[in-house]
Image (tube, rainbow, N blue to C red):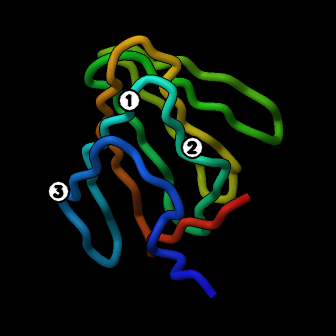
């Protein structure tokens, strides 16, 4: 069985700034066209801050699309299936804060 703490995807850059039992902070870079596949988390809320470029969050139940540009942020509660994508044409740089609670990545 795959480790629920090791996401099954690759993106241009991922730097963990903080990782504790209750919180994570990660800087992520997505090249144009890259995406993080549909997934959910059992306990943590994803707080996504766009630092550069454009990112699109696609959420399920109910369907919703959120476009983030520099200075924008969005939150996804535990259990809600979502994806993150860079529609291009420039790199997207995101700060992801996750918590409180134990981190997991559950493909949907």
Disc 1 versus disc 3: distance between alpha carbons? 20 Å
Mark 1 surroundings: few (<14), some (14-19) or many (≥20) residues within 10 A: some
Location of residue 27 with respect to 9 vertically, above or below? above
Q: Which residue is drawn at 27% across and 54% down?
A: 25
- Residue 34 position, x and y percent, is 49, 34
Q: Are marks 2 and 3 in contact (CB under 8 Å)?
A: no
Q: Of residues 74 and 69, which is closer to you in this image?
A: 69
Residue at coordinates 63% horizontally, 66% vertically from top-left? Answer: 106
Q: Quadrant of residue 100?
A: bottom left
Q: Is mark 2 on a helix, strand or loop?
A: strand
Would you name the residue on which mark 3 appears?
A: 17
Q: In which quarter of the image is residue 67?
A: top right
Of the numbered discs 1 and 2, the one sitting upstream in the chain is 1
Q: Where is residue 76 in the image (x, y as percent from the top left)?
A: 57, 43
The residue at which mark 2 appears reads as 76
Q: Do the residues labelled 1 and 3 touch (CB within 8 Å)?
A: no
Looking at the rendering, in which quadrant would you find the N terminus?
A: bottom right
Left or right side of 51 for 33: right
Circle 1 is placed at which residue position? 31
Kindly identify the residue that appears in the image at 77 percent across and 40 percent down. Answer: 60
- Which numbered disc flags the more N-terminal residue, 1 or 3? 3
Per the image, label 3 sits on a secondary structure element best described as strand
How far, Cα to Cα, is label 1 from label 2?
22 Å
Considering the numbered disc 1 on the image, is that residue within a helix, a strand or a loop? loop
Q: In this view, does 101 lie to the left or right of 14?
A: right
Characterize the local packing of mark 3: few (<14), some (14-19) or many (20 or more) Cα atoms within 10 angstroms.
few
Which label's residue is closer to the chain start, 2 or 3? 3
């Amino acid at each position: 069985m795959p480790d629920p703490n090791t996401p099954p995807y690759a993106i241009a850059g991922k730097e963990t700034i903080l990782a504790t039992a209750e919180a994570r902070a990660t800087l992520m870079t997505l090249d144009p066209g890259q995406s993080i596949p549909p997934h959910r988390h059992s306990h943590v809320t994803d707080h996504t801050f766009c630092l550069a470029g454009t990112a699109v969050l696609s959420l399920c139940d109910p369907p919703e699309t959120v476009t983030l540009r520099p200075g924008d942020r969005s939150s996804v509660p535990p259990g809600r299936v979502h994806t993150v994508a860079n529609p291009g044409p420039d790199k997207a740089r995101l700060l992801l804060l996750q918590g409180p609670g134990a981190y997991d990545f559950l493909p949907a």
